[in-house]
Amino acid sequence: MAGIGHWITSFYESTVFIYGTVLLIIYALLGLFSYLAIRNFLRKETYTNYFDLLTSPLSPGISVLAPAYNEGLSIIMNVQSLLTLNYPTFEIVLINDGSTDNSMEQLISQFELVPVDFAYNPKIKTQPINHIYKSTNPAFGKLTVIDKVNGKSKADAVNAGINIASFNYFVCTDVDCILDKNALSKLIKPVLEEQKKRVIATGATLRIANSCEIDNGVIIRMKPPRNLLARFQEMEYIRAFVLGKMG
Amino acid sequence: MPDIFTDFSPEEPVRIPLLDSFLELPVIIQIAVIFIFISSASIIFIQVRIWFTRYKGHLLQKRLAVLLPLIDGLITEHIILRNDVINNTTHVDNVELDIDAFRLRAFRKAKNKQVLIDRLISYRKGFSGSTGALLRRLYLELDLDKVSFKKMKRSQWNTKVRGIRELTDMDISISDVNILPLTNSKRNELRSEARNAYIKLSKNEPFKFFDISTEPLLKWDQIELFKTITTTENIALPSFARWVTYSSNKSIVSFCLKLIVHYNQIDAGPAVVKLLDNKDHVLRAEAINCLGKLKYEEVEQQLLHVYSNQPLNCQLEILKAIGRMETRHSVQFLKQEFLYSTDFDIRKNAARSLVKNASKTLIDELMVSSSEDGQLILKHSMNPLIKY
């Protein structure tokens, strides 16, 4: 009996040891690769002029898909923030995924929306769309709002957005996310500078907006969250995006 | 003579107590100790590195705090606020420039010289005319162009790019022998910078590298080049049809099609029409797009003729091109595609072109006779709130 106990203990210890060692090695390698990738990226960035992209008629169009469910508290500010993105050709497709609050009413009144007869090809099956709205105010011409039946998942809302998106490239975000002003230029760049392979998706770093200084939907100053738990989450984001993805 | 090997015996190795006790530990503990040691060393190294980088940044800021006001003061006094330059009374080449005022001890160090170069470039970007020309003269008379040329000769791609960019920003000619090989460099960033520089600086044949380019022109490069071409003053614009006809580099042909549209080079029409026989359907679609935007009506019948043999992307471009030409000759064809095609995109594009070309009576008639889907597509196409 003591022999089995000893065997279990040593098996457990060696398993934990091997697991820990492998994990450490992987993280060390990830750290190294990430360092090299970031150094290379920063060196390239020094010579990148995003302004050329912003003023070029050759820039490809991008659809920004933003699903929203009961975001009444901040929806107006967040849509305004999305509309201020720096990019020459883009549209914001906001998908109201069957919100039960007054999100839709707020959107209609704030952005002067009217229902339109919008023809689209439902390539992906989703919950039915009630109405598609466009703004009568040219200032919000880039905005399209889909009002659909709740699909119980973000994917269903995004799929509805993909079905009506006008451009070949789309960005999936949340309506409560604040995108950096130049996010679209930075996201499309890897697609435009690939010569042999075809880049079909790119990602970006995510930060926590808690404690940041925000003015009218635009982040003025980045700050780490004051809440300890949120700080841990921020650390996890940095690990995932800077270490994991770059590595 | 003392024998230094007296105490040495090959059978008895030198003993290091710490190592001995380490070697006596179980293997697992040994591995763990090595890991702890490497991890601790790495953390210390990274922390020191971070401190060092921050310290370097701090030193740079301190240096800039001294140098920038000094440079700004000199430039303001000797270049910007000169009455003869402001009033244009003297030609820039004849202006007496107090070069010695800029030959300060502080600028002998390479790092400080770089600050001076960067500042001059920054001013040059902000000033055109005589002031800009005088800033360029100052850059040349201080032999700063030699510093930039030296960078261009270095082996690291990023230093080369920096050198080329400095010369381009200061409008200094680079000989073809030096710049042309770089337009075909394997390093994308260098290649792109060299191409931009060549277009900006070459006075006679700014597009010569199109002839020798074997590397593809990436979409990003095209955007940068497009900007350079369309914003460079007094550029000698050629007929881009030349490369559409002869270039074997597809990306160059594709880029030239965009330039033909931008400069509305209608004369290039026949050369673009020849691309309709090209095997590459993407290039064919781009050619059709170009013809549509040029409103090259002569090709309309040919487009209708080849329509049925084309893949979807080319068919869509043909429908758009017919819409753009607005000749109203192909309304029947568009109506047929709108009513009978099974592809949604074809119906939508046919409807959009119909709205541009057909009479109101026909649209009303179609609204009545077409299916529910067709009516929706027509309403979509006619709605001014929907752009795409």
Image (cartoon, coloured by chain):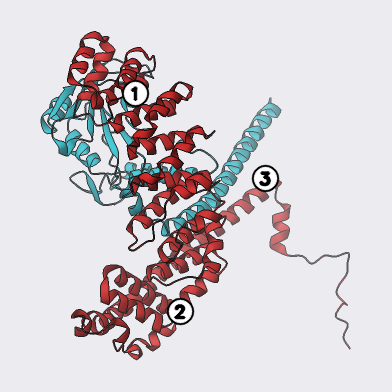
Residue B281 relative to residue B81: left or right: right
For the point 39% across and 43% down, the residue is A187
Mark number for residue B110? 2
Q: Amino acid at mark 2?
A: Ala
Report x, y in % for residue B205: 46, 62
Label 1 neighbourhood size at 10 Å, few (<14), some (14-19), many (20+)? some
Write down the colour of chain B.
red
For the point 48% across and 37% down, the residue is B275
Q: Mark 3: which secondary structure?
A: helix
Residue behind mark 3? B28
Q: Is residue A102 above or below residue A216?
A: above
Residue behind mark 1? A163
**Residue B5 or residue B135, whichever sits in front:** B135
Label 2 neighbourhood size at 10 Å, few (<14), some (14-19), many (20+)? few
Please identify, in this view, whether the residue under mark 3 or under mark 2 is nearer the observer.
2
Mark number for residue B185? none
The reply to whether residue A205 is visible in this rendering is no
**Residue A240 or residue A218, whichever sits in front:** A218
